[in-house]
Image (cartoon, rainbow, N blue to C red):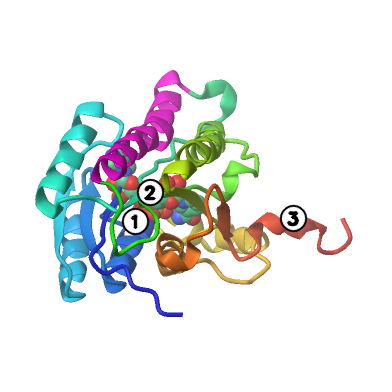
């Protein structure tokens, strides 16, 4: 299999750390230019850009809160000014604000929904507009590709994290409905649903021996995922090798969604 994203430009949200950073670097290694979106970690964004440049590709850093419409519009305008167009959007940025349900504040509910769902909607809408107005290219079969970084919690309920689980469940319907609407134009829309991947978002779990042991019981494949595991899946899903795939969710989770507690008979 010969995967090349040469001549394509990808915008990756939340690309200053974790999964977003690894996806941005993997896409650059496959030949894409990268718009590195970040929210607060400028140093992390600079490290991502540095790796993109090392891969021989062009990149720009763009600070924007994806939950703010004006900032998203300005980011897409800057991206198309710099690169002429966009070919791939990776809707990765996401947050957790955990808490017991009966004590969950409206602020924490809104913060998670605004980033994980509204932000994804705004970026996907702007990407779709750009793909449609640009028209077909000779270097990719699809008119454009949108990847959501979802979560196994789009189907696994998660006590103490109801805002997060609701945002990821909603994101799946958002992704599938967009995929249905845009398929006739040749735009592919898919999700990657990670299991437990070693990043800042869950550092408190994997860095604590007791919590880590409990987590491992949920992963049949016996290891915590690395951000690069998601990067590899993203490259393939964004490439012409996955040209017939739209509206799909690919679980990259070491078997977390296989109901591991039933392995011994239930
Ligand atoms: P992370 O905290 O390293 O990355 C999240 C990124 O999103 C950060 O760079 C952060 O700055 C950015 N961000 C947050 N709010 C933003 C905003 N309003 N605008 C722009 N950027 C914003 O954690 P991660 O694990 O790399 O998470 C990336 C995605 O993967 C998230 O959507 C998360 O829900 C999902 N995910 C992660 C795991 C895991 O185990 N790590 C599992 C399932 C899903």
Question: Which numbered disc covers residue 259?
Answer: 3
Which residue is located at x 34 percent, y 56 percent?
Answer: 20
Which residue is located at x 47 percent, y 37 percent?
Answer: 178
Magenta-colored segment: predominant secondary structure: helix
Residue 200 visible in the displayed image:
no
Q: Is mark 1 within 8 Å of ligand 1?
A: yes
What secondary structure is marked by label 1?
A: helix
Looking at this rendering, what residue extends furthest in the bottom direction?
1
Nearest to viewer (mark 3 / mark 1): 1
Residue 6 visible in the displayed image:
yes
Q: Is mark 2 within 8 Å of ligand 1?
A: yes
Question: Which numbered disc covers residue 92?
Answer: 2
What secondary structure is marked by label 2?
A: loop
In the image, residue 116 lies in the stretch drawn in magenta = yes
- Say if mark 2 contacts mark 3, CB within 8 Å: no
Label 3: how many residues lie within 10 Å, few (<14), some (14-19) or many (20+)?
A: few
| Disc with the residue nearer the chain's start (2 vs 3) | 2
Task: Specify whether 72 is left or right of 18.
Answer: left
What secondary structure is marked by label 3?
A: loop
- Say if mark 2 contacts mark 1, CB within 8 Å: yes
Q: Quadrant of residue 198?
A: bottom left
| Disc with the residue nearer the chain's start (3 vs 1) | 1
Q: Is residue 36 above or below residue 224?
A: above
- Say if mark 3 contacts mark 1, CB within 8 Å: no
The magenta stretch spans which residues?
Answer: 105-134
The C terminus - image quarter: bottom right
């Amino acid at each position: 299999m010969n995967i090349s994203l040469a001549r394509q430009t990808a915008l990756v949200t939340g690309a200053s750390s974790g999964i977003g950073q690894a996806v941005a670097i993997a896409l650059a290694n496959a030949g894409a230019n990268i718009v590195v979106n970040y929210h607060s970690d400028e140093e992390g964004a600079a490290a991502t850009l540095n790796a993109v440049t090392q891969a021989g590709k062009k990149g720009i850093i763009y600070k924007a809160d994806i939950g703010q419409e004006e900032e998203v519009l300005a980011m897409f305008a800057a991206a198309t000014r710099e690169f002429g167009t966009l070919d791939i959007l990776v809707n990765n940025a996401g947050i957790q604000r955990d808490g017991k349900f009966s004590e969950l504040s409206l602020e924490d509910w809104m913060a998670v929904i605004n980033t994980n769902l509204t932000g994804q909607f705004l970026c996907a809408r702007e990407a779709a507009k750009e793909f449609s107005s640009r028209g077909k290219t000779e270097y990719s079969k699809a008119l454009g590709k949108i990847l959501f970084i979802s979560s196994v919690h789009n189907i696994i309920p998660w006590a103490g994290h109801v805002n997060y689980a609701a945002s990821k469940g909603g994101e799946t319907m958002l992704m599938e409905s967009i995929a249905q609407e845009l398929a006739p134009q040749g735009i592919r829309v898919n999700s990657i649903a990670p299991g437990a991947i070693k990043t800042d978002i869950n550092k408190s779990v994997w860095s604590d021996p007791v919590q880590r042991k409990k987590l491992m019981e949920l992963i049949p494949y016996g290891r915590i995922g690395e951000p690069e595991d998601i990067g590899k899946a993203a490259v393939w899903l964004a490439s012409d090798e996955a040209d017939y795939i739209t509206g799909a969710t690919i679980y990259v989770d070491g078997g977390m969604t296989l109901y591991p507690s039933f392995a011994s008979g239930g």
